[in-house]
């Protein structure tokens, strides 16, 4: 049985507000790395030094398993030799390969969506935001895909669970034998993990990432997890309490949105400015994702509806 001692955390610096990212080395039949870190020289140096301290080099790693496609988790894939296996949910692929058609489609998708949400869209700025999300990412390809229930060769005892929300590509690994979970960004101690708007990959309609995220958290509540090894921050053992706190905070924010909507019908962008007056300009993508998430939540409970006028959605309470 793999015990916790065989999961070696490696903390790497990132250029993002979230701070360091944790990746994990697991010594099983294969030498597996869970996630790779952002593509910066600093992170590459720290990774190589840590591996060398453990008696390894990058070429000793047999496989890298991705928890999700965000740059702080995948960028350093570019440092690995060609032979390494790269394993993840199929939704990682267009992001980690920087597929140009996909990136172009993302720009059109978000231009359309943000117009609909009432954002005074600056097309140039929007495509810049999309491009920027790739800045510390990589240009690699999955060599194997995993889905709900998959097991990974050389990583005996671990099972893949799909946990969309923070990202549609998000998976976690559960070791049922000892209750360990490699959690990616599903649940973090220092901050809540933001469910982010994405371009849908299998349908025309945009997803509701917050609803997916809440469902993933509720699923986690039911699982026999003793300790979670997260993508950021320290190990989590009081998992149920933390989930309860996160769910409560989300509900409070949905109530806040409901109260604002009860005053007058408005666009998602108008709501976003009221909810996040200090940061909405700098963090437009993040704060709009959060706002739309609460609207999706209220709509799913039948408490809110929307009317379209000249291509813009106006939300009101029901
Ligand atoms: Zn992430």
Image (tube, rainbow, N blue to C red):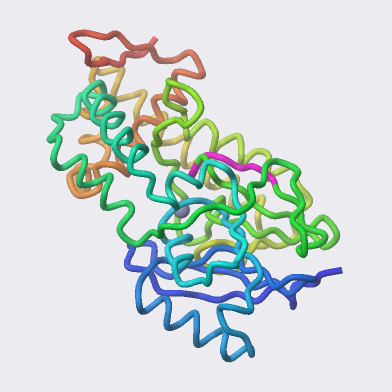
Task: Identify which residue, 286 or 41, lies in the foreground.
Answer: 41
In terms of image quadrants, where is residue 71? bottom left
User: What is the magenta segment's predominant secondary structure?
Assistant: loop
Q: Residue at x 34, y 28 (%)?
A: 257
Task: Identify which residue, 102 or 25, lies in the foreground.
Answer: 102
- Is 166 a magenta residue? yes
Q: Residue at x 62, y 85 (%)?
A: 56
Residue 210 position within the rendered picture, expressed as x and y whole percent measured from the top left: 48, 34
Left or right: residue 256 compared with residue 243: left
Vertical position of residue 29 compared to residue 221: above or below: below
Q: Residue at x 63, y 47 (%)?
A: 145
Which image quarter holds the C terminus? Answer: top left
In terms of image quadrants, where is residue 30? bottom right
Residue 226 position within the rendered picture, expressed as x and y whole percent measured from the top left: 75, 60
Q: Residue at x 45, y 18 (%)?
A: 299
Give the magenta part as a residue range: 161-167
Left or right: residue 126 compared with residue 244: left
Task: Identify which residue, 89 or 86, lies in the foreground.
Answer: 86
Left or right: residue 177 compared with residue 88: right
- Is 174 a magenta residue? no
Q: Outermost residue, front direction?
A: 82
Residue 223 position within the rendered picture, expressed as x and y whole percent measured from the top left: 75, 46
Task: Identify which residue, 140 or 252, lies in the foreground.
Answer: 140
Vertical position of residue 268 compared to residue 22: above or below: above
């Amino acid at each position: 049985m793999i015990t916790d001692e065989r999961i070696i955390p490696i903390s790497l610096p990132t250029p993002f507000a979230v701070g360091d990212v944790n990746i994990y080395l697991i010594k099983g039949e294969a030498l597996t790395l869970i996630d790779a870190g952002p593509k910066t020289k600093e992170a590459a140096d720290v990774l190589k030094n840590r591996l060398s301290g453990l008696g390894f080099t990058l070429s000793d790693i047999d496989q890298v398993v991705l928890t999700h496609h965000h740059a702080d988790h995948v960028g350093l894939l570019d440092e690995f030799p060609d032979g390494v296996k790269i394993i993840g949910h199929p939704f990682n692929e267009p992001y980690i390969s920087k597929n140009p058609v996909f990136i172009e489609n993302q720009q059109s998708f978000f231009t359309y969506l943000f117009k609909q949400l009432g954002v005074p869209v600056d097309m140039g700025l929007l495509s810049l935001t999309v491009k920027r999300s790739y800045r510390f990412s990589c240009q690699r390809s999955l060599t194997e895909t995993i889905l709900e229930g998959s097991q990974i060769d050389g990583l005996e005892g671990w099972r893949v669970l799909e946990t969309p929300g923070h990202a549609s590509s998000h998976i976690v690994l559960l070791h049922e034998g000892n209750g360990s979970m490699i959690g990616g960004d599903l649940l973090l101690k220092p901050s809540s993990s933001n469910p982010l708007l994405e371009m849908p990959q299998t349908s025309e309609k945009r997803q509701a990432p917050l609803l997916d995220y809440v469902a993933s958290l509720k699923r986690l509540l039911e699982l026999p997890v003793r300790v979670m090894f997260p993508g950021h921050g320290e190990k989590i053992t009081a998992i149920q309490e933390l989930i309860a706190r996160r769910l409560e905070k989300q509900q409070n924010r949905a109530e806040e949105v409901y109260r604002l909507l009860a005053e007058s019908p408005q666009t998602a962008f108008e709501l976003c400015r009221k909810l996040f007056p200090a940061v909405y300009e700098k963090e437009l993508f993040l704060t709009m994702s959060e706002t739309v998430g609460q609207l999706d939540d209220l709509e799913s409970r039948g408490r809110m509806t929307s009317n379209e006028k000249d291509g813009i959605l106006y939300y009101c309470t029901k």
